[in-house]
Amino acid sequence: MDKTSKHFSEGQHYRREGSCFIWTRYINAKGYPVSGGGWANRRGLSILAYKSSWEEFNGKVPAGHTLDHKCRNRKCINVAHIECVPHYENVRRGNKTKITSEAVREILIDVADEVISAIIADKHGICQGQVRAIVRGLAWGNVHNDIRPAAIAARNYPMGKKRAQQLKEYSLTKR
Ligand SMILES: [Zn+2]
């Protein structure tokens, strides 16, 4: 059901765009809606307008979780469009268009083959943290478990000669 904080009203704080409630006031550098926050501060809620709206109905965001815009519109404050997800789930969703299950398999095979994560990340247009998250099963869950143990083993220390050499070459290309 479409809803938002009782502190925000249409016309004054947001306008409707489809089923999205687009914040029309201050937007921070990251593109998220920010409210004046007097009432939110008093109640210990976030001054991020979409977050305080969600928290008003659901309580504080639990540790290790983050709020994700299902509509992919950061300025939207419609609580029905906001979902509380584990942090890595959000990272995965943000890259939904880039990373497919097949790509995850390729990544795991490359990791098992001791390709360094910087090179894998460049190849797939993701960040190294996401490569690590995929290997550890934090992003993309437990798929391709036939290859995962080999990938995890390849990441363990001490670092093999192959990875050490690539790291050296890679750092040279970035200079
Ligand atoms: Zn929306």
Image (cartoon, rainbow, N blue to C red):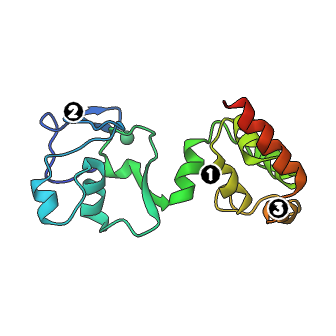
What is the crowding at mark 1: few (fewer than 14 residues within 10 Å), some, or many (at least 20)?
some
Along the line of sight, the residue nearer the viewer: 35 or 73: 35
Nearer the viewer's eye, disc 2 or disc 3? 3
Q: Position of residue 51 (x, y in %)?
A: 30, 54
For residue 73, what is the image quadrant?
Answer: top left
Give, as a three-letter code, the residue at label 3: Arg
Residues under labels 2 and 3: Cα distance? 46 Å
* Residue of label 1: 129
Report the image quarter containing ligand 1.
top left
Q: Position of residue 89 (x, y in %)?
A: 56, 56
Label 3 within 8 A of ligand 1 by Cβ:
no
Specify the label residue 148 is tagged with. Answer: 3
Q: Residue at x 74, y 47 (%)?
A: 117
Residues under labels 1 and 2: Cα distance? 34 Å
* Residue 40 position (above or below residue 12): below
Along the line of sight, the residue nearer the viewer: 41 or 128: 128
* Residue of label 2: 24
Element type at mark 2: loop
Element type at mark 3: helix
- Mark 1 or mark 2, which has the lower sequence index? 2
Give, as a three-letter code, the residue at label 2: Thr
Element type at mark 1: helix
Along the line of sight, the residue nearer the viewer: 121 or 116: 116
Q: Residue at x 82, y 58 (%)?
A: 144
Quadrant of the snapshot with the C terminus: top right
What is the crowding at mark 3: few (fewer than 14 residues within 10 Å), some, or many (at least 20)?
many
Residues under labels 1 and 3: Cα distance? 17 Å
- Mark 1 or mark 3, which has the lower sequence index? 1
Q: Residue at x 51, y 59 (%)?
A: 87
- Mark 2 or mark 3, which has the lower sequence index? 2
Residue 1 visible within the image: no
Give, as a three-letter code, the residue at label 1: Gly
